Image (cartoon, rainbow, N blue to C red):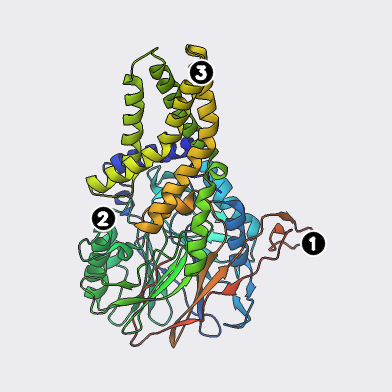
Amino acid sequence: MVQWFDPVILADAALRVVLSSVFGAYSDKREMQAAIEPRPHEYGPGGDGTLWIDFVADLGDGFDSTYAVASLLGQERLELAGGDGPPDLPRGRVLVMGGDEVYPTPTREDYEDRFRGPYAAALPWAPPASAPDLFAVPGNHDWYDGLTNFLRFFCSGRRVGGWQTRQRRSYFALRLPHHWWVLALDIQLDTYIDDPQMDYFRGVGLEPGDHVILVTGKPSWIKVSPDEVPESYKNLHYFKDKVVREAGARVKVTLTGDLHHYCRYEADDHSQLITAGGGGAYLFPTHTMPEKLALPDEPVSYTRAARWPGRESSERMAWGALRMPLLAPGLCLIIALLHASLAAALFAALDGDSGFLVVALIGLFALGSLSGYAAFEKPLPKFLAGAAHTALQLAPAAAIAIVAELAVDANGGWAALAVGLTAGAIGYLVGGLAFGLYLVALHRRAPKHANEVFSCQSIPDWKNFLRLRIDESGLTIYPIGVERVPRDWKYAVDGGLSDPWLEPADRPLTAKMIEGPISVPAAHLTTEAQG
């Protein structure tokens, strides 16, 4: 898994965010795709009148989790444990990826190693008659190079093992049987939907009475509140209003990635919102998801009906951030350096070898950095949280310097160096624990820092994806989960051309229904699913 608290990774990701945000405004590759492939892709029903589609999002992080999900998606028939659903399900004719196909940055090497490699090993080959097609929309991590490598891997007709890519744009439309559609959007870095993209979807051929499955890059509705409506939600609503509703069609399902868990909301009219972003990235908590959603310009309200993992499991795993010295050695080394610098400077100042200016500068640097890091928007809460964290961090180093000055009959540079090294060694452990304690305390109290509390742990378990079935009666959604993924693999020596190259060596790879199948009748229900 990506070590998200590694300072080098954080700095590289931050730089790419800045560069992609700046240059994306001047070189938007979506607008360059306007003349490409104006027609939608069409898929008819199978011999039994059905079409199966798979949806997965947020993959390409750790090998164990990504390969586990890929190997389940690649099975021609997926056997399910438990009795909450059918004993097995056929592989999707189409696989749709809902964003963030690679982490942490979209380099060619990361796409090869973290995405293409695991998927090609999970389904090395498929007979042409039954080979599934692959479509994808980019997430924010795919945009960090301006979409260059995403277009190379997904929009140039390449094969990914047994899956065949078909799209030529970073957005696409699929015409499905029984008046169903998939409309998949490219929202760039959470910005507007460009005019050429709007024109493309207006021209695909939506008709009155059609049912739309909408795919987008993030669950913008989660952050809607009476005080704030995010621009990303306004953009999504604008698309639904100006493209789908004006054509007389209806959005029944909206799929997205970005949040790495499963969570379902149900409205008064039985419409659904489903989060299924468990394709391989670190787990995101579910206990922070609001119980109710009140969305503007929607006639119904939504109530949380299911989440996975459950509240108790999610809250329990949050405490794991206290293991910060074990989880983030790079960060703890920086904290140790801060402790060492403060202790050495304070010892020298108390000994009369220097003034307190250096001590003050170190304290101000820590206060500014930790206040800026605090997950509050208003200045006063940010400052108070930063001040508390600064005191928590610097008090041990200051105590060591004061005790050393009182107890040790030595002075000079060597004595200050010894005090600094001692404080640094202790600060690695104590400072790391303090950082984890700050995250957990603020997360449980505010709640804030949900992403940091879980990203530092890089939990590879609780993976999920969706399998969708379309027939004359409507849409059925099968939420599929893997509670614990294998950590050790061995070569499958007796496999055929289409069999996975690797099989679990430590524990079985067991898939189960997260909850019972979710039915979306074509005639009168409206469903939105977030993945």
Above or below — where is 522 with respect to 274?
below
Vertical side of 130 occupied by 235: above or below: above
- Relative image position of residue 244 (x, y in whole percent): 27, 72
Q: Amino acid at mark 3?
A: Leu
Under tag 1, what secondary structure?
A: loop
For residue 53, above or below residue 519: above
Q: CA distance from mark 1 to mark 2?
A: 50 Å
Can you see residue 59?
no
Q: Is residue 52 visible?
A: yes
Q: Quadrant of residue 168?
A: bottom left
Amino acid type at mark 2: Asp
Q: Amino acid at mark 1?
A: Asp
- Going from the N terminus, do you reach mark 3 or mark 2 first? 2
Per the model, the C-alpha gap separating discs 3 and 1 is 61 Å
Q: Position of residue 413 (x, y in %)?
A: 48, 12
- Residue drawn at the location 66% of the way across and 65% of the way down: 509
Specify whether 116 is left or right of 96.
right
Badge 2: residue crowd in 10 Å (few <14, some 14–19, many ≥20): some
Residue under label 2, please give it.
194
- Residue beneath disc 3: 417
Among the 4 quarters of the image, the one containing residue 220: bottom left
Q: Which residue is mark 1?
A: 494
Judge by depth and name the residue closer to the eye, 383 or 292: 383
Name the residue rendered at 32%, 46% in the picture: 385
| 229 is higher (above) or lower (below) than 297 | above
Residue at the (41%, 34%) spot, across then down:
394
Image position, residue 105 (x, y; %): 46, 44
